[in-house]
Image (cartoon, coloured by chain):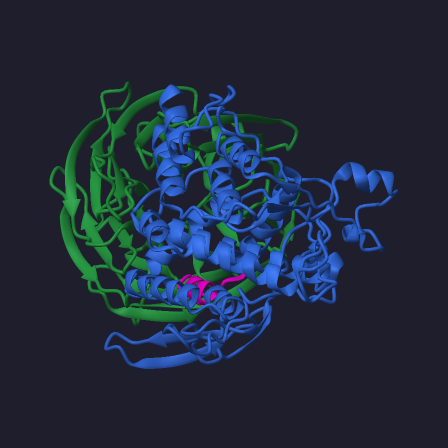
Amino acid sequence: MSMRTLPLVFINLGGEMLYILDQRLQALNTSEDNSEKGVWSENDRKRVMNGIVGAMFSKDFMDELLKPQQLYSHRTLKTVLTRIAHASIMRLNPASMDRLYELMVMAFKYQIFLCPRPKDLLLITYNHIDTIRELVKDTPVVVNQVDETHRKIIEVYSSLPEGEFQLLRQTLLIFFQDMHVRVSLFLKIQVQNPNGRFALSTSGPVPHGIDVPGLIRTFDGKGREVRRTEFPSGGSYSSSVREGCFELHGDRVIRLGMDMYTVNHPEETHTSKDTFVKTDNTNLLAKEELNLLARLMGSMKAEKEPKAETGFWINLFTTDQEEEEAGASGLAEEPLFEVINIQAMQDEQVTTELARIAGQFAEEEPPGNLTSSKGDDLLAMMDDL
Amino acid sequence: MYHKEKSIQIKNSASALYNNLGVLRIAPRSLTYFTVVHANVVNMVSASWDGLNYSHRQLQSKEPNVATSTSLIMQAAFCALPSRDLLVVTSQKGIQIYESDGSTMVYWHALDTPDTPTDQAVFARGISAVGKSYICVGDSSGSILVFDVPSKGSNITLSDVLKGHKKSITDIASECSGSQDCIADLISADDGGNLCVWKSGEEFQRFNNIPGFDISCTSVKLWKGTAVAGYGTGQIRLYEAVTGILHAEVNAHARWIYSLDIAPFSGLLLSAAEDSLVRVWHLSIKPESLSVEVAHLHNECVTDTQICGAKFCDGDGHAFAVTGYDLSEIIRYTQS
């Protein structure tokens, strides 16, 4: 349907990813400096943030996203987001990435679902951008990239009529349909019900530009109002609040898209055990989808790490197996997330791992040719399909 | 006034699309057909009136690409013509017409898609039968395709393309099908809130334009010469179709209206929106002043659900059915 979903999808999902990673990495931080090996310092956390934000908001990547195109599959989206996450010094194992993706998606689905007016999707996006800017505020180069992207988004989306925004929103709702992963934070603050559905209130302020329901006005043949009648609205609505700001900086008014996670609640990134599995009956990706994947991967900046640096692996969330071993139920009392496995890996292994992640959609093993660049590998694999 | 009945379970959940419920009452066989769109699939249920038999069928969008997202269905609706009933399914690829039980596809019309993607989405949306033998389908460019339907067989032809809208068509509706005489019998709505009023025939004539306010009209109905339109502002407006005179305006819902329906024999109006509420109204024409009045009758709240389809199950409005985004059931209500 809508050809303009990708930039908003990546900024919002990427934003949620950063909120979660920020919260998890802060929870892991037990030392101020780099001296202890295997411990995440404040400096490491900032490097991870800068790396991811730099990759996501790079001009080439954003330009690719801004081209009109369809929204494809979850598999493609997850692959690109994994690659973005790995543009930093951090490495996530597949189980962590799966859980992370679920959390990101459920947060974004919640925001889209409750979005008061379709064009408020932009305010939600700007909330994410504002917080991202804060996360990287110490690195002017990256802040510039964020500002540039924000300006482009304003330029492209500000003039879209509401009908187009609703089509965009409908496209996203269809994409996230049937996903009901329960997130303990959402359950706790009661935005999500135990059955996984989001709470939709029939009280509170109406969206900007909408009148409080309850009035019937009748007119005569000359357009003069002749009668006003009221009817019970079945809810308790109040007038709308002021409209949020759609400029580069300003009060967005809407709180959707702001960081819901805090350092003090480490268990809030827990998801229910019934992991969402969307039955995708096709093992192949459409040709257009593969082309998009190739373009997006190719346009991402490859971070040049000095040889002495190694990537740090992180297991963000305990796996199901570890949970069972610990005798945990769906909603654990103890925060089990303090058990972290961190492994340092060589660059070469990282390259293979990335190629493997990028090649997850291929049925056969990718050719074991590590001397060529990652980009060539990927394109070669796609030609073979 | 109404109470909830046993819901009908469907194979997948309803997608967030305007007017996402089709209903066809087959009196001779004591059956009702329902259709609900889920991404690239139409779920069809045939329900017997005694509530004992339900049979399910799924229709795929034609030429589903490997990536589902490029073959999404926008709408499925029944078209009841004097000679036959048909099921029309519109998607990003084109228009499929089936026999009303979904058993056979009798016609396929492919939409022109540009070679290189533009930022405009391409799709067909807005379906209505009109006159003796026409089916009208709208598209994202604002055109309305008119198909001439023979009384049986698959020799359906595209007989006209109506240009009256500049924005994507959202909904089309008609009245006076068959023998009745009307000044205007077709109305179409678009994403800018504009309404066009037409008279069907060998050459369709445009009778009137009722301009909008840049907010989508998502659902429209025509009843006794009155255009009833639902908007993204949550408002319902009643206009005299041929003149454009505004009869009434209702601040009906707190979010976008997704579906309107009228029970023609009783003048009952059904409205449903993303605010989780379904409302029943009564329309009455006052002959002395030639005005139309709206009275509110009933509310139903489908908790935590953004409703996407609501239709009466019969011409008197004795019962109605509702679908909601992410819900895998058709909820039914009957008059107490």
Of residues A69 and A232, the one drawn nearer to the viewer in this rendering: A69
- Tell whether B65 sits left or right of A323: left
* Extreme-right residue of the structure: A327
* Residue A80 % position (x, y): 47, 42
Q: For the N terminus of chain A, which image quadrant? A: top left
* Residue B105 % position (x, y): 35, 22
Of residues A367 and B124, the one drawn nearer to the viewer in this rendering: A367
Looking at the image, which residue is at 59% across and 67% down? Answer: A202
Drawing shade for chain B: green
Q: For the C terminus of chain A, which image quadrant? A: top left
Q: Quadrant of residue A143?
A: bottom left
* Extreme-front residue of the structure: A308
The span picked out in magenta is A114-126
- Tell whether B25 sits left or right of B6: left
Q: Considering only vertical position in the picture, is B313 above or below A121?
A: above
Looking at the image, which residue is at 53% across and 73% down? Answer: A231
**Is residue B310 at least partly visible in the picture?**
no
Q: How many marks?
A: 0
- Tell whether A363 sits left or right of A249: right
Looking at the image, which residue is at 59% across and 38% down? Answer: A346
* Residue A289 % position (x, y): 38, 34
Of residues A383 and B273, the one drawn nearer to the viewer in this rendering: A383
Drawing shade for chain A: blue
Residue A29 forms part of the magenta stretch: no
**Is residue B2 at least partly visible in the picture?**
yes
* Residue B107 % position (x, y): 29, 24
Q: Main secondary structure of the magenta part?
A: helix
Of residues A125 and B209, the one drawn nearer to the viewer in this rendering: A125
